[in-house]
Amino acid sequence: MTEALVIDQLQHRADRVREHSPEHVNRRIAREIDIRVQYCLREGREAVLGRLRELEREWDIDRVLMANFAIAGGATYLVGLHRLIRTPPWRERRAGWLYFFGTQIAFLLLHASEGWCPPMAVWRRFGVRTKSEIELERSMLLEALEPPLPHSEEEHGAARSTQIVS
């Protein structure tokens, strides 16, 4: 399989994250999928099975963003709340960290509604893939593991006759 075929298959899948990602990032990720699949096919069945195990553990972009928002949001909320509570009543209370927390919540809502947010662009450049990109690589590897099945009765009969002859 070539990079162009990978890109073509990814374009036929509905994916809001890919639509909002820069084209050069999408192409780089498609090229990496092609390289990994070709490598596994050259190395044999054990390499394919090992890569399939790796794919089971790989985090997609949505999972990475949820973890990102949970960690950064939780930290900024705690720091902002701590600063707000520790400030004496006679001093001006600064809520800057709480504004940062609100911004993260807005980014989360933006990602849920539009499929894009500023942290997503950063994570995509680091090579974090969408669920459909991971599933495409998985399906390509699974397809390589199994022999092709006949599509029609004629092919099925021809396949059976060649098995009988050999």
Image (tube, rainbow, N blue to C red):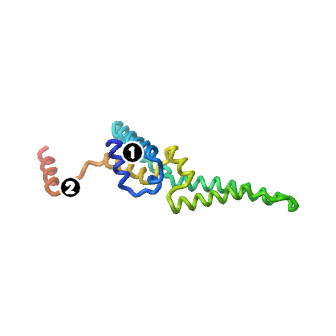
In whole angstroms, how far apart are the C-alphas of marks 1 and 2?
26 Å
Residue furthest right as drawn: 90
Residue at image coords 57%, 56%: 66
> Disc 1 marks which residue?
49
Q: Amino acid at mark 2?
A: His
Position of residue 144 measured from the top left corner of the image (x, y, whole percent): 31, 46
Is there a contact, CB below 8 Å, between mark 1 and mark 2? no
Decide if residue 60 is on the left or right side of residue 147.
right
Foreground of the two, 53 or 101: 101
> Disc 2 marks which residue?
151
Task: Determine if residue 141 is in view.
Answer: no
Decide if residue 118 is on the left or right side of residue 19.
right
Position of residue 154 measured from the top left corner of the image (x, y, whole percent): 13, 55
Foreground label between 1 and 2? 2
Position of residue 50 measured from the top left corner of the image (x, y, whole percent): 42, 43
Foreground of the two, 112 or 34: 112
Task: Determine if residue 59 is in view.
Answer: yes
Q: Amino acid at mark 1?
A: Leu
Decide if residue 142 is on the left or right side of residue 110.
left
The C terminus: image quadrant: top left
Position of 23 relative to 110 (above/below): above
